[in-house]
Image (spheres, rainbow, N blue to C red):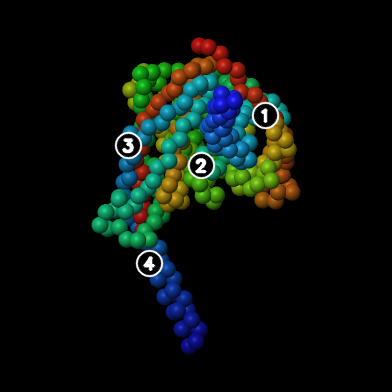
Amino acid sequence: MYKLFKIMSLVAVTALATSCSGPGEAHQYDVNDLEFSMEGPLFAGPNSAQVQISIDLEDLLQDTYVEGMEVSDAVLLSATVRPNDTLGFDNINSVVLSFASDNEDVEMQEVAYKNPIDANAAMSELEIASDLDLGELMDEGRVYVVLDADLMEDYWDGNRDFKLDFSLELTIK
Amino acid sequence: MIRKITLWAVAAIITFGTLSFVLPEQEKTQDPADRIIGIWEPSNGRSRIKIDRIGNKFYGRVVWLIEPNDADGNPRLDINNPNPELRNAPLRGFRMLKDFVYQGDDTWEEGTLYDPNNGSTYNGIIKMRDNNTLDMRGFIGVEALGRTDVWKRLKMPSRKKK
């Protein structure tokens, strides 16, 4: 009898734990016109620019936001880069997009790239590493968005400026 | 006499005025964590890695390769990346050092080292021997079973007019 009671208790605890860790609700989170400036002098090879963003769940969910909600999963849906100066993608070989955070336990992730990039294009849709789970990174709230552009030219004295749009699917619970 | 005092006063104002502009900048560059920032060459001399800072962590990108192109003359790609979707990413520019945090005592830890030759990622510890020498230790699991490579700092390329 005691054994049966013990088994039933275990089943009840497992069911409770499962219901608490439910799948959560998916929301699209768009970031538009994020400006990056790679400050010259720039040399041939990869040049980098970073912008810090805040993932504001309260702003995203409005009235449905409940204190303590967190991002359990996140997937990058799309990312588009476009030049923010008159130079376009001239002399740019490729671009790579990464996300990072200050948390020592959360690793930087390369999430998208374009290689090669069309020098005459007005914008470039990046290829997404779709199977990456960015939930831990996005749950940090403050995320560094890092854009690397590989420059063909040996030396460039000025800046190169770009704008980035990207969409995430955040699962929130 | 008055003229002499005035001259001293002007000199003092200029000196301390200048210092007040200069000191905060010097203090900024004195963060010991930032001493690792720069371009470094591993012992085999086949690549150069630029270490820079994002937030409170340090990262290193491949900025130069002795063989930048493959046998077909195309830029080398990260063909051994365990994530198939990233195998078309260019090797030049790849971040092979990630997430190192300064621990004090000229040591950076908690980061990883990626070897593009086999697509493996190792735990890493960086110790700065002197301002121009790094001991870069990579290991899986137990630090004692790792391997250390010595990296030398390179000077930035000299500026030339376009």
- Asked if residue A20 is positioned above or below residue A90 in the image, the reply reads below
Q: CA distance from mark 4 to mark 2?
A: 37 Å
Q: CA distance from mark 2 to mark 1?
A: 22 Å
Determine the residue located farthest toward the bottom in the rendered image. A1
Residue B156 on image: x %, y %: 61, 23
Q: CA distance from mark 3 to mark 1?
A: 39 Å
Residue on which disc 4 sits: A19
Amino acid type shown at disc 3? Asn
Of badges 2 and 3, the one in the foreground is: 2
Question: Which residue does the image show at 39% across and 66% down from the upper left?
Answer: A20
- Tell me the element at label 3: strand
Circle 2 Cα neighbour tier, 10 Å, few/some/many (<14 / 14–19 / ≥20)? some
- Tell me the element at label 4: helix
Of badges 3 and 4, the one in the foreground is: 3
Q: Are marks 4 and 2 on the same chain?
A: no
Amino acid type shown at disc 2? Gly
B132 vs B98, left or right, is right
The subunit carrying tag 2 is B
Residue on which disc 3 sits: A32
- Tell me the element at label 2: loop
Q: Nearer the viewer, residue A45 or A159?
A: A159
A152 vs B133, left or right, is left
Q: Could you tell me which quadrant the C terminus of chain A lies in?
A: bottom left
Q: Are marks 2 and 3 on the same chain?
A: no
**Decide: marks 2, 1 in contact (CB < 8 A)?**
no
Q: CA distance from mark 3 to mark 4?
A: 36 Å
Q: Which mark is residue B55?
A: 2
Residue on which disc 1 sits: B153
Residue A95 on image: x %, y %: 45, 28
